[in-house]
Amino acid sequence: MRALWRGAISFGLVSIPVRVFGATEEHGFRFHQVHRADGGQVRHRRVCSVCEEEVPAEAMAKGYRLDDGRVVVVEPEDFEGLPSSSDHVIDVVEFVSAEQIDPIFLHRSYFLRPDEVAVPSYALLREALERSWRMAVVKITLRRRETLAVVRPRGDLLVLHTLLWPDEVRDPGFELPEVTVGARETRMALALVDSMTARFDHAAFTDDYRDALEAVIRAKSSGAVIPAARVAEQTGAVDLVVALQRSLERVREGRTPPAR
């Protein structure tokens, strides 16, 4: 696995040389647009909307369209004067309690691997964060853009999660009407939650959609019959108390209640 970034975690007078590696990858199927008649892959030409001529890569630039329709072309040298932290420093701004970070702001995840000489100081920071139940709020420049992130312990490692900026999370755009929740319904809901509470084991869950799609592709490639899709059982509207009661009964019988 190739490092995406190399530098050092810096806080106070402490500097911990590290390398950044991508922590996640997608395993879904990658489809191409093809010609149905012969399977040939469809290519897209980059054509200018003004002169309608194909544009070679060396003639392309970044452009920003203003509200009045004008386009501002931004050249590589225009980015050089923009404020950013050092390209090779993960600058610790502060330490915060883990529960203060709303998961909705988490964006991408990366592993931080220490250089050999930095293993003791790396382990010390990881231990301090774990014992204090803290995260380090940091700034890092990735792909020429300064990004806010948090560093937290995960097992023996430190993991960096980039954060969205506040204005990158949408306002819901709707409000819920005020409702009064009855005591009986609340007790039953709490009982159902309690009865379905378990220790989360991520490996116990499978990507059923991907498995089914793989079966379809295998069947089509061999000329076999495509397996029929299972149709979920449709249920009509049920009173909330009745639905809770039935769900509790299913759990007690060892069956998982269907999603409602």
Image (cartoon, grey):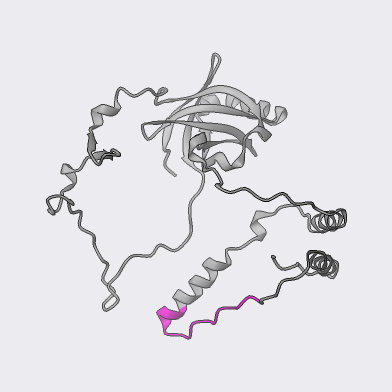
Determine whether, in the image, residue 29 is placed left or right of residue 124.
Answer: left
Q: Is residue 231 magenta?
A: yes
Closest to the observer, 219 or 194: 194
Q: Is residue 1 magenta?
A: no
Residue 61 position in % (x across, y down): 22, 40
Q: Is residue 155 above or below residue 194?
A: above
Determine whether, in the image, residue 229 is placed left or right of residue 82.
Answer: right
- Dominant SS type (magenta): loop
Determine whether, in the image, residue 63 is placed left or right of residue 145.
Answer: left
Kindly identify the residue that appears in the image at 44 percent across and 63 percent down.
Answer: 29
Kindly identify the residue that appears in the image at 65 percent across and 50 percent down.
Answer: 176
Closest to the observer, 52 or 23: 52
Determine whether, in the image, residue 91 is placed left or right of residue 132.
Answer: left
Residue 150 position in % (x across, y down): 56, 32
Q: Is residue 194 above or below residue 141?
A: below
Image quarter hosting the C terminus: bottom right
Q: Quadrant of residue 182?
A: bottom right
Q: Is residue 113 above or below residue 204?
A: above
Kindly identify the residue that appears in the image at 42 percent across and 80 percent down.
Answer: 220
The boundaries of the magenta stretch are 219-233
Kindly identify the residue that appears in the image at 83 percent across and 57 percent down.
Answer: 185
Image quarter hosting the N terminus: top left
Residue 115 position in % (x across, y down): 50, 29
Q: Quadrant of residue 143?
A: top left
